[in-house]
Image (cartoon, helix red, strand yellow):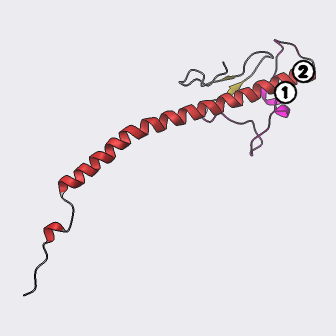
């Protein structure tokens, strides 16, 4: 006589599957907020780095053109020769979608997202 196969031992039980899903959900609940925070921090750091480049370009422009602190400058026309452009031939954008402004010599350039946490501004 040929023994029959017990089909009940061939798969996973509902309880085992529910435990695995619960563990995956717990790991996702821990990992996703950390990922979002790390992304926001890296965007802020990239924005601050771009603001430093704009500030350095403003200083170079002021020295070369004989401008003094408080003189007006235009970001798009006066400073573009002093900043390395991106592959599209424009100023590097804020990675979080903000826009940059630099209007006077000797003042820090600003980003429209300076009120976010972490802040997109020079200290």
Rendered-image quadrant of the C terminus? top right
Magenta-span inclusion, residue 81: yes
At x 71%, y 36%, the residue is 92
| Residue at 32 percent of width and 41 percent of height | 26
Magenta stretch bounds: 67-95
Q: Would you place residue 87 above or below residue 45 in this image?
A: below
- Say whether residue 56 is left or right of residue 32: right
Q: Residue at x 54, y 33 (%)?
A: 40
How many residues crowd mark 1 within 10 Å: few (<14), some (14–19), many (20+)? some
- The answer to whether the residues at label 1 and label 2 have Cβ atoms under 8 Å apart is no
Position of residue 26 in the picture relative to residue 43 (left or right): left
Q: Is residue 48 left or right of residue 115?
A: right
Percent x, y for residue 94?
A: 65, 33
| Mark 1–mark 2 distance (CA, rounded to whole Å) | 12 Å
Instruction: Point out residue 14 in the picture as x, y percentages from the top left corner.
Output: 18, 56
Name the image quarter holding residue 77.
Answer: top right
* Residue 99 in view in this figure: no
| Residue pointed to by mark 2 | 63
Q: Earlier in the sequence, mark 1 or mark 2?
A: 2
Residue 51 falls in image quadrant:
top right
Residue 17 against residue 69 in the figure, above or below: below
Give the camera-side residue of 81 and 56.
56
Q: How many marks?
A: 2
Q: Quadrant of the N terminus?
A: bottom left
Q: Nearer the viewer, mark 1 or mark 2?
A: 2
As drawn, 39 above or below 60: below
Numbered circle sitting on residue 8: none
Does residue 50 appear in the picture of this structure? yes
Name the element at disc 2.
Answer: helix
Regarding mark 1 in the picture, which secondary structure is present there? Answer: helix
- For mark 1, what is the residue? 78
Q: Is residue 107 magenta?
A: no
């Amino acid at each position: 006589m040929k023994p029959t196969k017990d089909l009940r031992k061939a798969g996973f039980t509902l309880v085992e599957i529910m435990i695995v899903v619960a563990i995956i959900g717990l790991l996702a609940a821990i990992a996703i907020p950390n990922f979002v925070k790390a992304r926001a921090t890296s965007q802020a750091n990239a924005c601050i780095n771009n603001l430093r480049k704009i500030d350095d370009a403003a200083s170079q422009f002021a020295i070369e053109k004989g401008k003094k602190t408080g003189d007006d400058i235009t970001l798009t026309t006066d400073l573009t020769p002093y900043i390395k452009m991106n592959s599209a031939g424009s100023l590097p954008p804020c990675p979080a979608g903000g826009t940059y402004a630099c209007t006077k010599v000797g003042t820090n350039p600003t980003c429209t997202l300076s009120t976010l946490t972490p802040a997109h501004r020079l200290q």
